[in-house]
Amino acid sequence: MLLLTVAMDLIRRQGFAGTSVNDLCAAAGAKKRAFFHHLVSKEALGVAMVRHRTEITGAMFAAHDYDSQPIRWTGSLPI
């Protein structure tokens, strides 16, 4: 989970393409061999990040009581 947390922070700052496996390993204090023991590629890490984020936001949205606290439209969406 440490690698996932570090990756989310680092990739948010540098972008996915701008972050190498070496960058991720250095930031997490992990060896490259350990990275590839758990993941087949950096892209697999990206998929894991999306799944993790979906779980977090899905739980957050599921916990909201939309009946007692309706969402109010406050303006237009930026395009």
Image (tube, grey):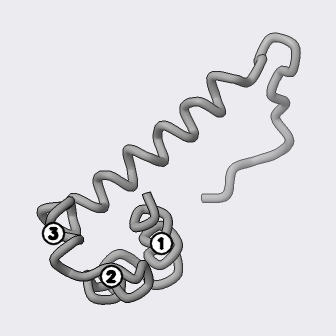
Instruction: Decide which of 52, 17 is in the foreground and name it.
Output: 52
Q: Report the amino acid beneath label 1.
A: Val
Label 3: state its secondary structure: helix
Any mark on residue 25, and which?
2
Q: Report the amino acid beneath label 2.
A: Cys
Q: Report the amino acid beneath label 3.
A: Phe
- The location of residue 61, given as percent across then percent down, is 64, 29
Q: Earlier in the sequence, mark 1 or mark 3?
A: 1
Label 1: state its secondary structure: helix
- The location of residue 34, given as percent across then percent down, is 21, 72
**Residue depicted at 31% across the width and 61% down the height:** 46
56 left or right of 1 in image: right
**Residue depicted at 48% across the width and 78% down the height:** 10
Q: Earlier in the sequence, mark 3 or mark 2?
A: 2
What is the quadrant of the N terminus in the image? bottom left
Any mark on residue 36, and which?
3
Classify 9 as above or below 47: below
Residue at which label 1 appears: 6
How many numbered callouts?
A: 3
55 left or right of 42 in image: right
52 left or right of 19 in image: right
**Residue depicted at 59% across the width and 30% down the height:** 59
The Cα–Cα distance between marks 1 and 3, rounded to whole angstroms, is: 16 Å
Instruction: Decide which of 28, 21 is in the foreground and name it.
Output: 28
The 10 Å Cα crowd at callout 1, few under 14, some 14 to 19, many 20 or more, is some
Classify 76 as above or below 30: above
- The location of residue 20, given as percent across then percent down, is 28, 85
* CB contact under 8 Å: marks 1 and 3: no
The Cα–Cα distance between marks 3 and 2, rounded to whole angstroms, is: 10 Å
**Residue depicted at 21% across the width and 81% down the height:** 32
Hey, which quadrant is residue 64 in on the image? top right
